[in-house]
Amino acid sequence: MIELKNIRKSFDGRTVIDGATATMKAGQCNLIIGASGSGKTVLMKCMVGLFEPDEGEILYGGQDFTAMNNKEKTEIRKEIGMLFQGSALFDSLTVEKNIMFPLNMFTEWSHQKKLERVNEVLARVNLKDTNKKFPAELSGGMKKRVGIARAIVLNPKYLFCDEPNSGLDPQTSLVIDKLIKEITIEYNITTVVNTHDMNSVMEIGDYILYMHKGKKEWEGSNKQIIFSKNQLLNEFIFASEFLRDAKEMRMLEETGKIPNNRNIDEMIGPENLPKG
C-alpha cells in the first residue's frame, strides 16, 4: 500500500501539487488522471523519488519514504518496478539483456539463475523465445510487454506505469491493460498508472485519482465514475457526445433499467435496422 499525505510541490514559486492525499492499495490498479499540466506526472515522480516534495509524506507500507536516507530509499526502490512511456528499452541490447539489466544491478545471482528468471517473465507476458531479438525487431505492443517483463523481473511490491498505452492501437491497448491487471492481482502488487486513456480508466480503474490544477478534484472507482456529478471530471472524461451517450447507457445498465445482455435490435427496434 502507498499512502500520500498532503503532498505539495512547487517550481520557481509556482504550485504544481497542492495538498494531494490518497491511499493506493495492493492488488488493485490505481490510476492518476488529469489534463496536461494537472500535476499527475509530477506527483508520480515524487512517489518514485525523482522529485522531493516540499511538504507531506509518502508512505510505502507505513514507512515514510520522504524521511529516509539514501540507503533506505535504495531498499524501497528495489521493490519498485517501472514501465516507462516509451518502453525505454536499450536499442543495442537484446530482449534478454534488457530484462536482465535490473538483475545485474540489484542482485548477485548466477547467470543461469538470472536467465531462468528472464525466461519466466517472458513467458508471463507471452513473449517466449524472443530472447535474442532486438527492440527494432519488435512491434509497439511487444516492446510494451518487454517493458512490463523488465519491470516485474525483481518481483516488485510496487509497479509504476507511465502512459502504458501511449502510441498503441486500441486493440493492443486492451491487451496491455489486461496484462497489467492480471499481474497486479496475481502478484498482489500496488500498481500506479499515469494515463490519458479513457479505456484504461473504465476497464482497470479500481481506484482513480483525478487531478485538476494540482489538487485532488475527485477520487473513486470506475464504477463510481459513471455516477459522478463532478462537473470538471465529467467534462474531462466524457468530453465527446459519444462518450456522454455511453455514460448514460452505462448508468441505465447499472441501475437495471437496461439489461446487460440486451442486443441492439431489442434496444432500437428491428424496424429501424438497415435492410439487407
Image: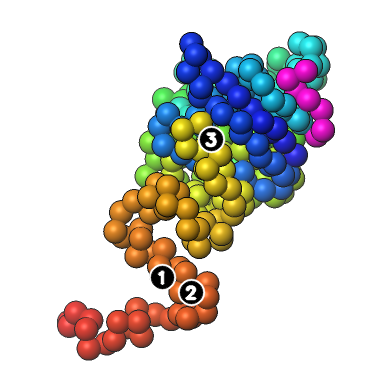
Give the labeled residue for mark 3: 215
Residue 22 among magenta residues:
no
* Discs 1/3, front: 3
Query: In the image, what residue type sits under mark 3?
Result: Lys
**The N terminus is located in which quarter?**
top right
Q: Is residue 66 above or below residue 254?
A: above
Mark 1 vs 3: CB contact within 8 A: no
What residue is at 50 percent from the left and 62 percent from the top? 227
Question: Residue 75 appears at what percent x and percent y?
Answer: 79, 20
Extent of the magenta region: 61-67
Frontmost residue, 70 versus 99: 70
Q: Residues within 10 Å of mark 3 (few under 14, many from 20)?
A: many
Give the labeled residue for mark 2: 253
Does label 3 or label 2 sit earlier along the sequence? 3
Query: In the image, what residue type sits under mark 1?
Result: Met
| Left or right: residue 110 compared with residue 8 | right
Helix, strand or loop at label 3? It is: strand
